[in-house]
Amino acid sequence: MSSPLTIAMPKGRIFDEAYELLLKAGFNLPTKMDDVSRKLMLEMPEENMRIILSKPMDVPTYVEYGVADIGIAGKDTLLEQHRKVHELLDLKISKCRIASAGLPNTELNEIAPRIATKYPNVASAYYREKGEQVEIIGLNGSIELAPMIGLADRIVDIVSTGQTLKENGLVEYEQITEVSSRLIANPASYRMKNERIVDLVKRLKNCVN
Ligand code: PRP
């Protein structure tokens, strides 16, 4: 038998929707999440597949290096990282947006405004295009803290329900881009395991709303 098709899936809030989609597409996966919740690798011998679970930001890395043949990654991560992967399908799940936000009724500081973000490349490209010179401050999470404690004038971050902004007294200023999860593939795997990957794309396509 050929080697298993390895899928890199994001842990956390994207996981449930992505897993649901694979189940809907008819893949024979364990349905009881309790059984799998702490595992980082799920073997599915009946499907000759396995799932590896990683931080959302790491999915494109596993796929680029070919340790996963395919992966499910947010468009936010793909825009930020420019990894050498094929983007095969918009799964239309985990929809959200990248936006700028800050304290209400505030202008950008005219001299060297500071932007805190988990997306330094997306943020600098955005402000460069607008012709605004900014200083980008990279953070790894809890980005909303930055304007509250005076670290930055604005943040560039994911907004989904808007709840985090609201609870921290921030408002959205500009929408930068819409985001949803994408199916990606390693270019060599796409050639070598083409039939299986094309079949998987077809099955998922039928379930995408
Ligand atoms: C993301 C993002 C926002 C929040 C937005 O953070 O960075 O903080 O979700 O979601 P909402 O609009 O539905 O409130 P995440 O939960 O991934 O955690 P993080 O702060 O560790 O990045």
Image: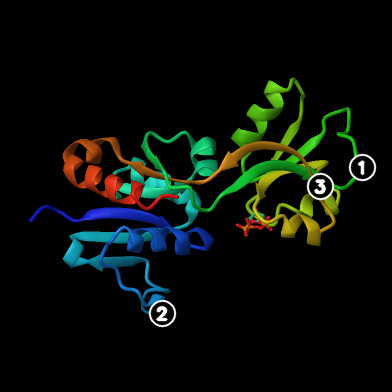
The residue pinned by badge 2 equals: 34
The answer to whether any part of residue 69 appears in the image is no
Residue type beneath disc 1: Asn
Residue 140 location (% of width, % of height): 63, 52
Q: Taking 183 as reference, is 25 above or below it?
A: below
Q: Is residue 34 left or right of residue 180?
A: left
Q: Which disc is residue 151 wearing?
A: 3
- Identified at 17% across, 66% down, the residue is 46
Q: Taking 84 as reference, is 61 above or below it?
A: below
- Identified at 15% across, 54% down, the residue is 3
Give the mark nearer the N terminus: 1 vs 2: 2
**Near-viewer residue (201 or 135):** 201
The crowd level at tag 1 (other Cα within 10 Å; few <14, some 14-19, many 20+) is few
The crowd level at tag 2 (other Cα within 10 Å; few <14, some 14-19, many 20+) is few
**Residue 195 occupies quadrant:** top left
Q: Report the Cα–Cα distance between label 1 and label 2.
A: 46 Å
Q: Is residue 194 left or right of residue 185?
A: left
- Identified at 89% across, 46% down, the residue is 104
Residue 142 location (% of width, % of height): 69, 57
Residue type beneath disc 2: Asp
Q: Is residue 93 left or right of residue 110?
A: left
- Identified at 87% across, 28% down, the residue is 111
Q: Quadrant of ligand 1?
A: bottom right
Give the mark nearer the N terminus: 3 vs 2: 2
The residue pinned by badge 1 equals: 105
Q: Is mark 3 within 8 Å of ligand 1?
A: no
Q: Which disc is residue 32 wearing?
A: none
The crowd level at tag 3 (other Cα within 10 Å; few <14, some 14-19, many 20+) is some
